[in-house]
Amino acid sequence: MILAKGRLWDSGRQDEILSGLEAYINRIRSTKRLLRETVIRAVDALGKRLEAGEFDAQLVDLLGAADARRIKAEAALAMRREALEYRCGLELGDAEEAALPVFGEGGIRVRARLEPLGTILHIAAGNADGMAAFSAFEGLLTGNFNIVKLPSADNGLTLTILEKLIEEEPELADFLAVFDTPSSDTAAIGKMAAMADGIAVWGGDEAIRAVRAAASPGVKLIEWGHRLGFAYLSGYRDREEEYAALARHIIETKQLLCSSCQVIYLDTARMEDCEAFTAEFLPVLEKAAREHPAADIGQQAQLSVRTWCRRLERAAARAGGNDADRDDRGARVYEGENCSLTVCRDSALELSPLYGDVLVKRLPEKNLLPVLRQAKGRLQTAGLIASDEKRERLTELLIRAGVCRVMTAGHMSAEFIGGSHDGEYPLRRYVRAVNIETE
């Protein structure tokens, strides 16, 4: 379905709607200005309805019970008026307009203010439920017209959210157009990109390269590419509690988020230490997997297929006279119940097999910065487990290596108000500064 001009349209009318969209956007932008307070009031009201449980049944139907509870809690916090006002103050400044000093011999006086980029095309990834809607919220908060290209895995969640938002404030319908266009329809996406002053793209390298190729020169690219998270262990405060928190994080996020733990790094140069850690941690990870099973039949099926594939690979290795506990790179695999740990010989930061399958690697403190710098541009979150005397020093070292967030292991993917996204404040990227000479 398509949401445009405040109503739903059949997807078959996409070309018709796109052909008239530029003229519609020009008319809206030349006659209307979207006030920040209008958006805040609508988002806050919708958040209160969400928090009160009005949409619980829809969320469970779309996401499953476990993910619905998590998404609801995170969204309700982010949609509160105080959270939105705090973000706007932090990211955009409290004053929307400021006088600048007198410049030049002619006594020129200038004032400055922030204005919307104009029209933003949002191309969202499907690895975070509701991401497209929240990207649109940010575009609305900054006064832009927003064209949203839904991810294929959206399952109707974004349309539901934005329809309800328009119920709260019908004026917002004038600044939204949402399309369920498949990524394969490059002609339609090219038409959307041609209307945009900025393109916000969420996704991997392939998606970002495609957008760069489609964007006209001068269009601002707002890239939110895939990032990697990892845990770094160098001592601990409470081993049992911190191991349990890390295991819950791994299982609950399924390692699908940019902030999820892909690699567990140990502050050691000894493979024996990695083997010893694995013996300690695997039972903890298995316990978390039992306590937080796959939420729906699709996830359960995927886990079952992955488990059987690993068993077949090990059986084939034994039949061939090879070490069945090692993968094709020589890394040793420790199989658990719906989870596994793979002890690797290298130290590179990389994506894990996901869904409770975690890589374990050596990374002595002295090598931390040069090794992590090899993944520059992809670093996001470090979950730090360390003794008190090391924590501050390691935090600073991780930041210097390029990490954007240093969290405790159990809170690697925690949402909080005022947090940056990949080291940047998003709202700042959706506005431009203008200068106006005063008399």
Image (spheres, grey):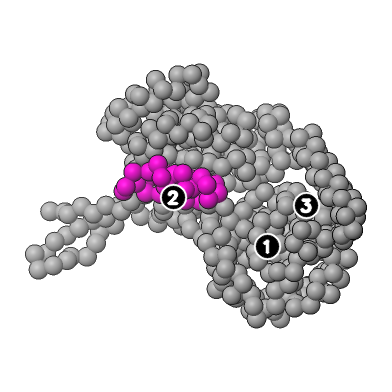
Horizontal relation, residue 315 to residue 90: left or right: right
Q: Which residue has dot 2 on it?
A: 222
Please, which residue is most extreme toward the front here? 320
Q: Which residue has dot 1 on it?
A: 230
Can you give x and y, in whole percent of width and height, for residue 149 in the image?
49, 35
**Sequence-first tag of 2 and 3:** 2
Q: Which residue has dot 3 on it?
A: 356
- Would you call the spot at circle 1 few (<14 residues within 10 Å), some (14-19), or many (20 or more)? many
Answer yes or no: is residue 142 visible. Answer: no
What amino acid type is highlighted by mark number 2? Ile
Q: Residue 187 has which mark? A: none
Dots 2, 3 in contact, CB < 8 A: no
Residue 395's place in the image compared with 326, above or below, is: below
Is 338 included in the stretch rendered in magenta? no
Where disc 1 sits, the SS reads strand
Can you give x and y, in whole percent of width and height, for residue 29 in the image?
30, 34
